[in-house]
Amino acid sequence: MDTTAGLQSALAALSVNAKPFIPNVDAAVFVPTFLQSSPTEISNSDGHGRSCRLCRLAPVENGGGTEADMAVEVETWEQKEEPGEGEPGGGGALGGEGGSSEEAQGREEVEMMEEEEEEELPVLKVIPLPPNAPKKEHVNVVFIGHVDAGKSTIGGQIMYLTGMVEKRTLEKYEREAKEKNRETWYLSWALDTNQEERDKGKTVEVGRAYFETEKKHFTILDAPGHKSFVPNMIGGASQADLAVLVISARKGEFETGFEKGGQTREHAMLAKTAGVKHLIILVNKMDDPTVNWSLERYEECKEKLVPFLKKVGFNPKKDIYFMPCSGLTGANLKDPIEECTWYTGLPFIPHLDSLPSFNRITDGPVRLPIVDKYKDMGTVILGKLESGSIAKAQQLVMMPNRHTVEVLSLLSDEVETDEAVPGENLKLRLKGIEEEEILPGFILCNAENLCHSGRTFDAQIVIIEHKSIICPGYNAVLHIHTCIEEVQITALICLVDKKTGEKSKTRPRFVKQDQVCIARLRCAGTICLETFKDFPQMGRFTLRDEGKTIAIGKVLKLVPEKD
């Protein structure tokens, strides 16, 4: 009998305790903070310090708040803080004296829900341009370099410095990263958005983001540094006008990236092949204790890199620019820093802004190599317009399948426009074609001037790295603009002397590393391509095999099919 009575009394006590678990009543008011019009509602919903910040900020957002209004809000919030206002906690979630921990927990859950809801909104802010503003020049910047050199972190930091990511979002990333013991990764999360990339800290897909300076509009393409994802990196580099090679100054990291198997070399070479003319080398992690902004280390990295970049084909005087920085602290990205007295040039973002304009072919034929496609109320394709201009409702042809399509809408970096010029990253919604009928590597052309397509072509190839010899019948993977296709070397036509450019009279039986030859290649399927002379962006390619870049080359002539 005693035990049952005890149980009953215990149960009774429990139910009493359970009562303050009602804070969901508040939740209804609390959830859509960003939709609320009157700031007082916000202040009444929650007793957080953060709500105070919101209530102070709200009138500024709405644009109609006066100082008097602000005073009122602050007052209401302060009144709110006094315990014993008839609310069962008397203080907010911080729990005044009467506030129970369960209630606070409830509040936290509600807040978590609110944050999750907010997260579904896109992180990037799109700045609407005034209608009469002159169109800024679009520049695509690809970040390349060895794995863990800090490409995504620098990208995230730039977006924060130019106001494209809110401080609050970054604070959230920092909290989440700390939970996973990865607090130095939080900046890269602005660009590495999917879970797998965040867990491993490795970029897989090419991340995209935008930022603007006074004169230009930039698209960041954050390429993966890992050697398994080089094909993705080639796709990213083929859209870029400008490459930023990120190298780590930390002892041992630079060496690993630069040695035979490292990605610093391979990426620089692939960027050159993809048609990037200007290369900025960011020597990152200069704030590391092992480096501490030392000029010696910076010069050491520079001395090792320059001869290699020269060999790849960059002109050290015109095409290359070195600068020290720190991605994690943001030093020398936007503002110069005191510690680094020996560097006198512009910081990174002003330097980008001061670069000369790129010459684009606006009146040429329309050429838009497709990077990606998906279904969204019709067929949507992504790509960079290489030449020509595209307008809404224009009729275009999808090569090599010769589908006639119509442009339903045009988005340039997430902003809808009526017309696009070369160099812009576009999203087009098309009519007259199914998503399944498109593959990356297809090209949108205008009907009057179609691009060439075929399976067989002659090309000049430089063998960069291959242990044994290459004979006719050798198979590799061809990367040309955004297209990836299997290819076979069917015949070697002649060798080319590197110094004099003379062609050999006899046909070589094989070619080996560091030789230049002219060969006939045959693809497994039909691809779109142009000769290098006519259209460089679609006439240069790389050959890869077993995860290594074997050769780079340019298309000399297209061979018509013998039926």
Image (cartoon, rainbow, N blue to C red):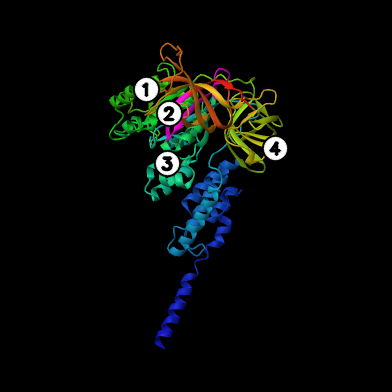
Residue 156 within the segment the image draws in magenta:
no
Task: Estimate how packed mark 2 is, as few (under 14), some (14 to 19) or many (20 or more) residues with alpha carbons within 10 Å.
Answer: many
- 4 or 3: mark nearer the eye: 4
Above or below, comparing residue 305 to residue 169 in the picture: above
Confirm whether residue 212 shows in the render: no
Residue at x 53% of width, y 44% of height = 57
CA separation in Å, label 2 and label 4: 40 Å
Compared across the picture, whether 350 is left or right of 427 comes to left
CA separation in Å, label 2 and label 1: 16 Å
- 3 or 2: mark nearer the eye: 2
Above or below, comparing residue 181 to residue 373 in the picture: below
Q: Earlier in the sequence, mark 1 or mark 4?
A: 1
Give amino acid for label 2: Ile
Magenta span of residues: 531-552
Tell me the quarter of the picture where residue 268 sits.
top left
- How far from the left and from the top, in percent, is residue 489? 49, 27
The residue pinned by badge 4 equals: 431
Give amino acid for label 4: Lys
Residue at x 39% of width, y 51% of height = 179
- How far from the left and from the top, in percent, is residue 195? 47, 47
Q: Which mark is residue 550?
A: 2
- How far from the left and from the top, in percent, is residue 349? 46, 27
SS label for mark 3: loop
The residue pinned by badge 3 equals: 202
Q: Earlier in the sequence, mark 4 or mark 3?
A: 3
Give amino acid for label 3: Lys
Task: Estimate how packed mark 3 is, as few (under 14), some (14 to 19) or many (20 or more) residues with alpha carbons within 10 Å.
Answer: some
